[in-house]
Amino acid sequence: MDKAEFLSFFLIALGVSLVIHHVVFWQRPFDVNDVMHHEFFEAIFFTAGLTLLIATHSKRRGEKLK
């Protein structure tokens, strides 16, 4: 596992922990009326983590095909 994969898993884990935090304290995973608070960071962490993970795997796959 390289640094990019570790960072992507870390960002996804942060997003999951924010969802769990939101469920524990407010009994719902998302609150549309409070979109500028927890939900914003959940979306950013999930998107950044998934994008980085997809980019890392597609780069490796491209290197294997050569």
Image (cartoon, helix red, strand yellow):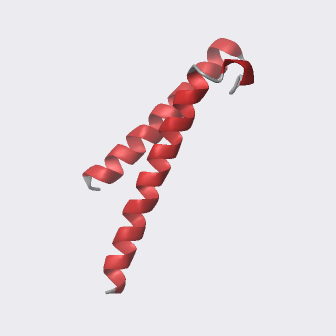
Q: Is residue 19 visible?
A: no
In the picture provided, is 36 more to the left or to the right than 6? right
Which image quarter holds the N terminus? bottom left
Question: x and y percent of residue 6 in the render?
Answer: 33, 47
Above or below, 51 relative to 15: below
Seen at 26% across and 55% down, the residue is 2
Residue 3 image point, x, y percent:
26, 50
Q: Quadrant of the C terminus?
A: bottom left
x and y, in percent, of residue 21 in the image: 57, 20
Residue 38 falls in which quadrant of the image?
Answer: top right
Q: As drawn, is 26 to the left or to the right of 7?
A: right
Q: Is residue 65 above or below residue 32?
A: below
Specify whether residue 26 is in view. yes
Q: Residue furthest top?
A: 25
Task: Give coordinates of residue 15: x percent, y percent.
Answer: 51, 34
- Res 26 → quadrant: top right
- The single residue placed furthest to the bottom in the displayed view is 66
**Residue drawn at the location 37% of the way across and 61% of the way down:** 56
Name the residue nearer the viewer: 56 or 16. 56
Q: Is residue 47 left or right of residue 65?
A: right
Residue furthest out toward the left: 3
